[in-house]
Each structure stands twice: as C-alpha cells, then as structure tokens.
Image (cartoon, rainbow, N blue to C red):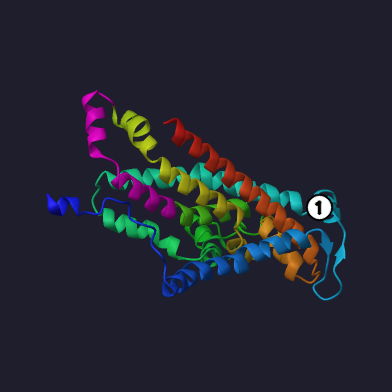
Amino acid sequence: MPFISGRRTGRRGTRRYTRRDLVVLGVLLGLPVLLDLAIVWGPTLASVVLSFTSWDGIGDIKWVGTRNYVNLFTNYPQFWPAARHNLLWLAFLGLVATPFGLLLAVLIDRGVRFSRFYQSTLYMPVVLSLAVVGFIAQLVFSRDQGALNAVIGDTETPTDWLGDPDLNIWMILLAAAWRHTGYVMILYLAGLKAVDQSLKEAAAIDGASEAQTFFRVVFPTLRPVNVIVGVITVIESLRAFDIVYAVNHGRNGLELLSVLVTDNIIGEASRIGFGSAIAVVLLTVSLGFVVTYLVQELRGEKDR
C-alpha cells in the first residue's frame, strides 16, 4: 500500500537540544548541584582537611597530622561517654521506638475507631523541633515544678529526673522516642496501605494466623520502608543535638558527639581543628551504619 511504503522506517534520530533547553537544564540541574556542593560537601571536605590542623579561627593554620585524633581517643575524657550515649541513643530508637511505631501502625491499619484522630495525635510531635521537645521535657521532668513529680506525689524529696546523670539520659530518650515513634508510624502506615490484600487473604486460606501472616507475608513486602526507617533512625540518633542542648547544654550525663563538636568549634576554646576531628569521627560512624545497612538491603533485593 502506498501510505505504508511511504512510512518512515528508520529510527528516530537523537533530539538536538536548543540553546534554551540547555539553559533550562543548566538552571534546574546545575543550581541544586552547586548548592549541594557549597552547603553540604564543601564544608564536609573542609572539616576533613581541618581535622589534621590546629586553628583557632583567627591565626595561622598549622598542620599537625593525626595529633587531633590521638588526643581525641586518648586524652579527651568527654569523648567516650559521648560516644556511648550516641550508641545508646541509636539502640533505644532502633529497638524500642521503631518497633513501637510499627505496632501502632499495624493497630491503626486494622481499622480501629477514631483512627484519624489517633494518626493526628501520634504524628503531632513530629512537627515539633527537638529543641521544643526538650523544653517540653523540662516541663514534665523538672525537679521542683515538673508534672511527673506532681503526678506521682513526690514533693517532699522530689526526684531530679534531669539533674541526676544516672536518670536524665533515659528521660531524654523517652522524649526523643515520643517524637520518633510518630514518624515511624506514619511511614509504616503508608507501607501497610500499599500491601496487596490478596496476599493476606491467601495466607488466611492456607490457615496462617494473624501473627504468621504479618511476619511471613506482610513484613517482607515492607522492605523499602524498612530501608527508609533504618536510615532515618541512624541519622536521628547520631545527629541528636537540639534536645540535650535545650535541657542542660549537653552536660552532666547528656554528652553527645554533636555537642562536643559545637563546644570545640564555637566555644571559648575555639579549637576548630580538634572539633573538626570529632565531626569527622561522627561522619564516619554515620556513613558506616548507613552504607552497611543499604548494602545489606540491596543484596537482599537481588536475592529475592
């Protein structure tokens, strides 16, 4: 047929971008990349370089090699308690707050009454900054005027929940978990809504209980959400700063690596090189957890 023989049979050639297209692409892609390099990776690389120097922010920069790291691990008594607190923070959010958020998501997904109200109420702390959560923790756990001592009637010899270094870390962890639980709940709730209902029905027909259906059918389908929750939990644990600084400036039992970075860089000592070394250690630990977790999850996806 004539119209068939006249049809173009060759492959469509590569589109040529006009100068206007190149300008638009350069603006839409180039500016975010430049901002990311300038705001994130630029200071990161600068911190890595400065960690091998001695600098007070005003005088000359002196190269000291690994001396900052040697002093950090051997002659800086605040470092190891802060590192333990960060790891405790990670363990508490990962093993307590995250499973509790998953439990709340499962209960709400089952269609309980007033589920919208529960979602809004439990998610409300997420919109608050950790600094505000720290101020709320002071109102609740304060020794003299705190709500907790008033509720339990401990007025004659009130417990110093935030002043006792053996107790305050646990109180602050509860406050941080209060915020983290709502975030995890919303993420898992979105994942549960996307689960194919036919999988649950097939498991029920095969005689599986609700617990068996969840752990063997539903939970494996939540692998993408697990990756997101795991990365967020690690980041939230290792970057914690606002809440402890709002309570007591990160001292007396609430030391964290992020607080040590701030105290050394912008504190009275102005040891920018030493503070940068602490920041590099925190960055290395963060990347170690995140990269290891992502590699394991990606390997799991390939094996499926």
Q: Amino acid type of disc 1?
A: Tyr
Judged left or right of residue 179, residue 111 is left
Dividing the picture into quarters, in which one does residue 202 lie?
A: top left
Where residue 97 sits in the image (x, y, percent)? 48, 47
- Residue depicted at x 33% and y 28%: 212
Specify start and end residues of the magenta stretch as a single range: 182-208
Q: Nearer the viewer, residue 152 or 254?
A: 254
Task: Give residue 50's position: percent from left, percent from top.
Answer: 78, 63
Report whether 179 appears left or right of 234.
left
Q: Based on the displayed image, in which of its 4 quarters is residue 163 positioned?
A: bottom right
Q: Is residue 127 visible?
A: yes
The quadrant of the image that shows the C terminus is top left
Q: Position of residue 108 (x, y in %)?
A: 30, 48
**x and y percent of residue 66 in the render?**
84, 53
Marks counted in the figure total 1
Q: Which residue is mark 1?
A: 69
Q: Is residue 141 on the magenta stretch?
A: no
Membership of 183 in magenta stretch: yes
Q: Is residue 249 visible?
A: no
Q: Secondary structure at mark 1?
A: helix
Query: Which residue: 47% across, 48% down?
Result: 229
Q: Quadrant of residue 171?
A: bottom right
